[in-house]
C-alpha cells in the first residue's frame, strides 16, 4: 500500500499524553506532514512512545506500508517536550490523550486552555466523558471538542467528533476539516450519549455475544466465527443500513418490510445486561484462550493491523459504485 500525499489544514500540532492512543496520534499527524510536538507528564512515557514508533516504523517499512525516506521524514517531524507550555507553543491543534478521568481531564484542560494560543483547538480523545463537563468553567470552552479515535488511529480512520454545549460551530467545522486533511474519517455527532456511537453499538453486540456464550447456546469460537466469517465481511464495506439496502432486490424498504416482524421478535428476545462478573470474564477468557491457541498476542495484533490496512487499501482502489 503506497501512502497518499496529504495536505494538513493545520501545520503545527501538539499531542498531550503519549500512552497507547497518544503515540498512535503522533504517528497520524507526523505521517500527514504536521510538525508534531509531544508532551507527557511522565517523561518515561515519552521515551516509550518513541521506542514504539521506531519499532513500528521498522515493521511498516518491512511490510511495505512506508518507504524508508517517508519513515525518516515522519520521525524528523516529531519533537519531544517536558514542559506543557513549550509543547503547545505555535500549535494550532492539540490532541489530548490523558487518562479517562473527569477530574484529571478538567485540570489538564485548565492547563491547556491557559497555555494554548487563542485560536488553538483543544480536542480530547475521551472514550465517553462529556466535554461540556470537562470544559464547563474554562474561558476557552468554545474551542474544546471531542475527537474520539478508534484504537489505533494510525490504522483505523474513524474519529467521532462532538462539540460541547459551549463549543463554537466553527471549531467543529475546523476540527472535521483538519482530521480529514490528515487522512482520518471524522463522524459528526449531534448530541452527547455515553459511549458515543461506536462503543454503544459495540456494547449492544457484546451484551448479546456474552449472553449467547453464558446461556450455553454457542461457544466463543462460534460467536467470533459468525462475525469474522459472516457479518464482519459485509461490515468491512458497508454499515448495517447499507447492508439492508443490498439484502433484498427491492432495497431497504422491501427488506425491512419483509423482515420487520422477525426483527421485532428478535429484538424483543435480546438478552438483558449480563452480570459481567469475574467468573463470567474467566469463562469467556478460557474460550478465547482455546480459540487463539499459543501464538503470541503481539504477533496477532500486528497481523490484525496489517490486514486492516490491506482491506483499507483494497477499498480505496475499488470504491463503492
Ligand atoms: P494510557 O494510560 O495508555 O495513556 C495515558 C497517558 O497520559 C500516559 O502516558 C500518562 O503518563 C499520561 N498522563 C497522565 N496525566 C497526564 C497529564 N496531566 N498531562 C499529560 N499526560 C498525562 O491511556 P490511553 O489508552 O492512551 O487513553 C488515553 C485517552 O484515549 C483516554 O481518554 C481514553 O479513554 C481514550 N481512548 C482510549 C482507547 C483505547 O483503546 N486505549 C481508544 C479510544 C480512546
Image: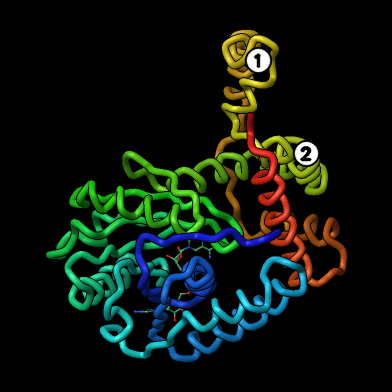
> The residue tagged with tag 2: helix, strand or loop?
helix
Quadrant of the rendered image holding ligand 1 = bottom left
Is residue 167 found left or right of 289 in the rendered image?
Answer: left
Crowd band around label 2 with a 10 angstrom C-alpha radius: few (<14), some (14–19), many (20+)? few
Dot label at residue 91: none
**Does 163 appear above or below 251?**
below
Is residue 278 found left or right of 182 in the rendered image?
Answer: right
Is residue 204 found left or right of 312 in the rendered image?
Answer: left
**Does 123 appear above or below 109?**
above
> What is the CA distance from the residue labelled 2 to the residue labelled 1?
19 Å
The x and y percentages for residue 112 are 25, 74
Q: Which residue is drawn at 69% across and 14% down?
A: 248
The x and y percentages for residue 117 are 20, 72
> Which quadrant does the N terminus fall into?
bottom right
Q: Quadrant of residue 14?
A: bottom left
**Does the image show residue 210?**
no
Question: 138 and 71: which one is in front?
Answer: 71
Q: Residue at x 70, y 71 (%)?
A: 60
In the picture of the structure, the residue carrying the numbered disc 1 is: 262
Q: Residue at x 58, y 17 (%)?
A: 264
> Which quadrant does the C terminus fall into?
top right
Foreground tag (2 vs 1): 2
**Does 241 appear above or below 67?**
above
Q: Residue at x 30, y 73 (%)?
A: 91
First reached walking from the N terminus: tag 2 or tag 1: 2
Q: In which quarter of the image is residue 118?
A: bottom left
Dot label at residue 226: 2
Residue placed furthest toward the left: 139
**Does the image show residue 246?**
yes
Query: Which of the colour schemes (rainbow, by chain, secondary structure, one colour) is used?
Result: rainbow
Amino acid at each position: 500500500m503506497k501512502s497518499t500525499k496529504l495536505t494538513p489544514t493545520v501545520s503545527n500540532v501538539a499531542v498531550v499524553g503519549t500512552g497507547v492512543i497518544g503515540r498512535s496520534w503522533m504517528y497520524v499527524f507526523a505521517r500527514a506532514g504536521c510538525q508534531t510536538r509531544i508532551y507527557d507528564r511522565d517523561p518515561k512515557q515519552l521515551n516509550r512512545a518513541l521506542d514504539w514508533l521506531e519499532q513500528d516504523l521498522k515493521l511498516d517499512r518491512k511490510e511495505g506500508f512506508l518507504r524508508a525516506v517517508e519513515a525518516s521524514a515522519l520521525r524528523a517531524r516529531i519533537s519531544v517536550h517536558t514542559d506543557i507550555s513549550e509543547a503547545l507553543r505555535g500549535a494550532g491543534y492539540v490532541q489530548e490523550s490523558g487518562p479517562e478521568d473527569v477530574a484529571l481531564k478538567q485540570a489538564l484542560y485548565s492547563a491547556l486552555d491557559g497555555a494554548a494560543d487563542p485560536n488553538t483547538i483543544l480536542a480530547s480523545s475521551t472514550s465517553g466523558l462529556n466535554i461540556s463537563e470537562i470544559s464547563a468553567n474554562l474561558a476557552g470552552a468554545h474551542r474544546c471538542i471531542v475527537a474520539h479515535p478508534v484504537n489505533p488511529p494510525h490504522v483505523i480512520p474513524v474519529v467521532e467528533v462532538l462539540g460541547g454545549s459551549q463549543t463554537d460551530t466553527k471549531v467543529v467545522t475546523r476540527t472535521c476539516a483538519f482530521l480529514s486533511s490528515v487522512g482520518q474519517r471524522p463522524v459528526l455527532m449531534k448530541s452527547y450519549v455515553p459511549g458515543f456511537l461506536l462503543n454503544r453499538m459495540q456494547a449492544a453486540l457484546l451484551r448479546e455475544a456474552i449472553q449467547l456464550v453464558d446461556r450455553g447456546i454457542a461457544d466463543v469460537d462460534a460467536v467470533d466465527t459468525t462475525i469474522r466469517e459472516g457479518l464482519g465481511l459485509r461490515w468491512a464495506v458497508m454499515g448495517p443500513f447499507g447492508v439492508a439496502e443490498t439484502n433484498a432486490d427491492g432495497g431497504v424498504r422491501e427488506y425491512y418490510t419483509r423482515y420487520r416482524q422477525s426483527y421485532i421478535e428478535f429484538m424483543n428476545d435480546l438478552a438483558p445486561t449480563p452480570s459481567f462478573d469475574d467468573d463470567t470474564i474467566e469463562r469467556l477468557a478460557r474460550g478465547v484462550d482455546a480459540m487463539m491457541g499459543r501464538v503470541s498476542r503481539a504477533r496477532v495484533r500486528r497481523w490484525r493491523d496489517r490486514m486492516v490496512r490491506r482491506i483499507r487499501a483494497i477499498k480505496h482502489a475499488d470504491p463503492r459504485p
